[in-house]
C-alpha cells in the first residue's frame, strides 16, 4: 500500500486532545517515518484547521456537518486539500481504511469505543489511549485483536511500563512468564492529603490541576477521585490477562516509576522516566525500535527520593468500586464506566459535588444488574441504562440540595 518503504500511515483519533497533540509532536520530529492519513477532532475547529495545514492529512473528521462546513471553507481559503467528513461512521472509516497502518485511539470516553474496535477488527497497529473502550468491552475487544491479528500497544503510561517490563513477545500467559503480580503506580492526584470534609467542597478547577501530568479534563477528574486507577486495573486485566488479585495499586507521588512487574523469582522490573506522555507514545509508535521523543533524560539526583503509600479507600472509594465491577464481570465495568462519565460531566458542570461522584457509581452498580457481555449491543445497552439511571439520580440529588 505504501509508496515509500518504512513510511507508516497513521490515523489520530482525538487529534486535538492532550494525547493527540503529544502524538503529533512526536510525529513532527520524524516526518521521514510517519505520514498522517487522517485526523479527528470534536469541537476545537481552529486547532484542527492548524493541524491540517501542518500535517496535510488526506481526511479530517469533525463532530457534525455544521463544523465540517466551516472547516471546509477555512481549509479551502488556506489552500489545504484535506477532505472534510463528519460523524461517528466517518470515524470508523478513518480507523479501518486499508491505507492506514497505525491508529492512535485517543478519543476520550465511550465515544471512542466503536472506531477503536473498528481499528482492531481491521488488524491495525492500535495505539490504545482510550482506556474506556477496554473497560466497557474488554472481552469483545481482545477477541477482535486476536481474530484480526491486530498489534495492540498500550499508551497509558502504567500499561506501557508493564508492557516494557514483561518479556518480549508476552502472550498473555502470566504463569508461563513467571509473573506473580502487576503493580500499577498512582500519583494520588491533587487531593492525596486532603481530609474528607474538604474533599466534598473541591471545585472543577482544583480537580483539573494535576500535580505531575497535564491531561484532558475528564481524566484529570478521574485521577483526582482515583477512578482513573480503577479503570487502569480493569485495563491491565484485559491487556495482560491477569486476575484482579494479581493487580496491586501503590501510591507513588513522584510519578517517576510508571509501573512494575513482580516475578516468581523475586525480581521486580519497572520502567522509569520523567512524567511525559511522549515517552509511551514514541515507544508504541516505534515498537520494537526506539525513537527520540523530545523528552529530557531522567535526572536521578534531581528526583532524589522515591516514596510509596497505600491507597486510602475511605477517602477514595472509586478504586474499590472498579475492583468490584471487574470481579462481577459481564457488563458491570460498562455500567461503572457510564455512571462515572455521567457523574464526572455533572461535576465539571457544577451539578454534582466531588465526593458524590463515587455515590452515583455505587448506586448505579447497586441498582442495575450486570449481564453477560457477549455482543456490542449488550455493552451499549448497559451503557445506556447506566446513563439514564445516573442522570436521573444526579438531577434528583440536585433538587434535594436546591
Ligand atoms: P482530551 O479531552 O484532551 O482529548 C479528547 C479528544 O477526544 C479530543 O480530540 C476531542 O475532540 C475528542 N472527543 C471528545 N469527545 C468526543 C466525541 N464525543 N466524539 C469524538 N471525539 C471526541 O483527553 P486526553 O487527555 O487526550 O485523553 C484521551 C484518552 O486518553 C482518554 O481516554 C484518557 O483516559 C486517555 N489517557 C490520557 C492520558 C493523558 O496524559 N492525557 C494518559 C493516559 C490515558
Ligand atoms: Mg495512566
Image (tube, rainbow, N blue to C red):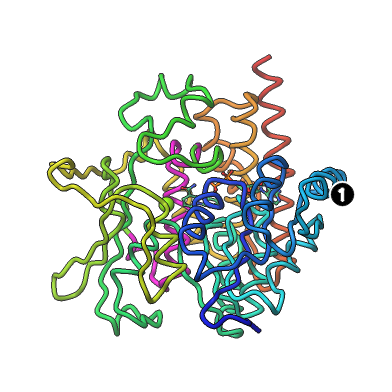
Q: Residues within 10 Å of mark 1 (few under 14, many from 20)?
A: some
Residue under label 1, please give it. Answer: 65
> Along the horizontal axis of the image, is 148 left or right of 254?
right
* Residue located farthest toward the front when viewing the structure as drawn: 79
The residue shown at (21%, 45%) is 308
- In the displayed structure, would residue 374 be above or below residue 248? below
The residue shown at (72%, 74%) is 97
Look at the image and tell me in which quarter the N terminus lies: bottom right
The residue shown at (75%, 69%) is 93
- In the displayed structure, would residue 322 be above or below residue 98? above
- The front one of 168 and 10 is 10
Segment tinted magenta in the rendering: 221-247
The percent position of residue 184, horizontal first and vertical second, equals: 33, 56
SS type, badge 1? helix
The percent position of residue 298, horizontal first and vertical second, equals: 23, 50
The residue shown at (41%, 19%) is 198
The quadrant in which residue 164 appears is bottom left
- The front one of 250 and 382 is 250
The percent position of residue 378, horizontal first and vertical second, equals: 71, 65
246 falls in the magenta region: yes
Does label 1 point to a residue whose CB lies under 8 Å from ligand 1? no
| Magenta stretch: dominant secondary structure | helix
The quadrant in which residue 194 appears is top left
> Along the horizontal axis of the image, is 83 left or right of 184?
right
> Along the horizontal axis of the image, is 258 left or right of 369?
left
- The front one of 248 and 121 is 121
244 falls in the magenta region: yes
The percent position of residue 85, horizontal first and vertical second, equals: 81, 57
Look at the image and tell me in which quarter the C terminus lies: top right
Amino acid at each position: 500500500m505504501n509508496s515509500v518503504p518504512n513510511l507508516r500511515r497513521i490515523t489520530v483519533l482525538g487529534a486535538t486532545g492532550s494525547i493527540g497533540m503529544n502524538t503529533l509532536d512526536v510525529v513532527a520530529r520524524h516526518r521521514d517515518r510517519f505520514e498522517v492519513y487522517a485526523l479527528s477532532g470534536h469541537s476545537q475547529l481552529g486547532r484542527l484547521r492548524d493541524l491540517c495545514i501542518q500535517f496535510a492529512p488526506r481526511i479530517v473528521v469533525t463532530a457534525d456537518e455544521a463544523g465540517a462546513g466551516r472547516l471546509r471553507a477555512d481549509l479551502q481559503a488556506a489552500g489545504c486539500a484535506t477532505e472534510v467528513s463528519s460523524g461517528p461512521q466517518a470515524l470508523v472509516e478513518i480507523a479501518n481504511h486499508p491505507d492506514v497502518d497505525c491508529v492512535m485511539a485517543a478519543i476520550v470516553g465511550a465515544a471512542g469505543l466503536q472506531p477503536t474496535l473498528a481499528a482492531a477488527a481491521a488488524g491495525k497497529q492500535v495505539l490504545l489511549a482510550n482506556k474506556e473502550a477496554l473497560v466497557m468491552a474488554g472481552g469483545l475487544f481482545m477477541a477482535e485483536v486476536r481474530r484480526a491479528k491486530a498489534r495492540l500497544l498500550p499508551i497509558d503510561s502504567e500499561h506501557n511500563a508493564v508492557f516494557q517490563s514483561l518479556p518480549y513477545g508476552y502472550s498473555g500467559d502470566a504463569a508461563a512468564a513467571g509473573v506473580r503480580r502487576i503493580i500499577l503506580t498512582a500519583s494520588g492526584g491533587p487531593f492525596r492529603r486532603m481530609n474528607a470534609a474538604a474533599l466534598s467542597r473541591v471545585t472543577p478547577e482544583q480537580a483539573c490541576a494535576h500535580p505531575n501530568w497535564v491531561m484532558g479534563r475528564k481524566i484529570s477528574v478521574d485521577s483526582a477521585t482515583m477512578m482513573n486507577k480503577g479503570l487502569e486495573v480493569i485495563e491491565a486485566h484485559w491487556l495482560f490477562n491477569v486476575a484482579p488479585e494479581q493487580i496491586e495499586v501503590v501510591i507513588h507521588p513522584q510519578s517517576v516509576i510508571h509501573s512494575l512487574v513482580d516475578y516468581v523469582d523475586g525480581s521486580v522490573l519497572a520502567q522509569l522516566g520523567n512524567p511525559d506522555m511522549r515517552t509511551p507514545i514514541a515507544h508504541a509508535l516505534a515498537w520494537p525500535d526506539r525513537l527520540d521523543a523530545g523528552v529530557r533524560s531522567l535526572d536521578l539526583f534531581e528526583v532524589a527520593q522515591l516514596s510509596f503509600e497505600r491507597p486510602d479507600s475511605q477517602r477514595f472509594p472509586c478504586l474499590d468500586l472498579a475492583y468490584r465491577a471487574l470481579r462481577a464481570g459481564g457488563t458491570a465495568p460498562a455500567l461503572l464506566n457510564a455512571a462515572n462519565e455521567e457523574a464526572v460531566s455533572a461535576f465539571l458542570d457544577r451539578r454534582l459535588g466531588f465526593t458524590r461522584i463515587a455515590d452515583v457509581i455505587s448506586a448505579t452498580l447497586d441498582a442495575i444488574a450486570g449481564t453477560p457481555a457477549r455482543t456490542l449491543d449488550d455493552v451499549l445497552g448497559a451503557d445506556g441504562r447506566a446513563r439514564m439511571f445516573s442522570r436521573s439520580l444526579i438531577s434528583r440529588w440536585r433538587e434535594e440540595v436546591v
